[in-house]
């Protein structure tokens, strides 16, 4: 009697669909990071100069904070 094995392992190779999935995941991550920076920039830009000073910032710090570069 013969046995037919239908399981395959894909160690080390993800193939074309794996690479496309990686590309989609990378693009989704980049979009999420861009959107987070946009939302942060908009929220901080909506604050008055006094409110920014209360949290230890000035208008010039907004872009640095939104891009993830700490100014503190």
Image (tube, helix red, strand yellow):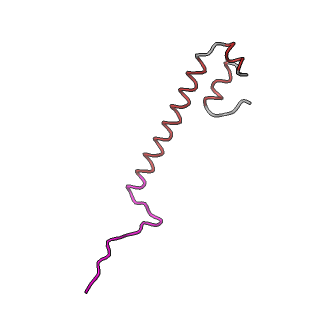
Q: Residue at x 43, y 54 (%)?
A: 19
Viewer-proximal residue among 29 and 52: 52
Numbered circles on residues, count: 0
The quarter of the picture where residue 8 lies is bottom left
Residue 29 lies, in percent from the top left, at 50, 41
Is 8 magenta? The answer is: yes
Image position of 2 with respect to 12: above or below: below
**Residue at screen point 62% across, 16% down:** 47
- Please provide percent x and percent y for residue 43: 57, 21
Magenta region: 1-19
Name the magenta segment's main secondary structure.
Answer: loop
**Residue 6 within the segment the image draws in magenta:** yes
Which residue is found at the position 42% from the left and 66% from the top?
10
Q: Quadrant of the C terminus?
A: top right
The residue sitting at 43% across, 60% down in the picture is 14
20 vs 45, nearest the viewer: 45
């Amino acid at each position: 009697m013969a046995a037919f094995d239908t399981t395959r392992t894909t160690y080390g190779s993800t193939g074309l669909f794996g690479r496309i999935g990686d590309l989609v995941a990378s693009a989704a991550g980049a979009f999420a990071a861009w959107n987070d920076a946009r939302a942060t920039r908009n929220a901080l830009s909506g604050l008055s100069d006094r409110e920014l000073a209360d949290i230890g910032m000035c208008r010039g710090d907004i872009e640095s904070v939104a891009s993830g570069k700490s100014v503190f």
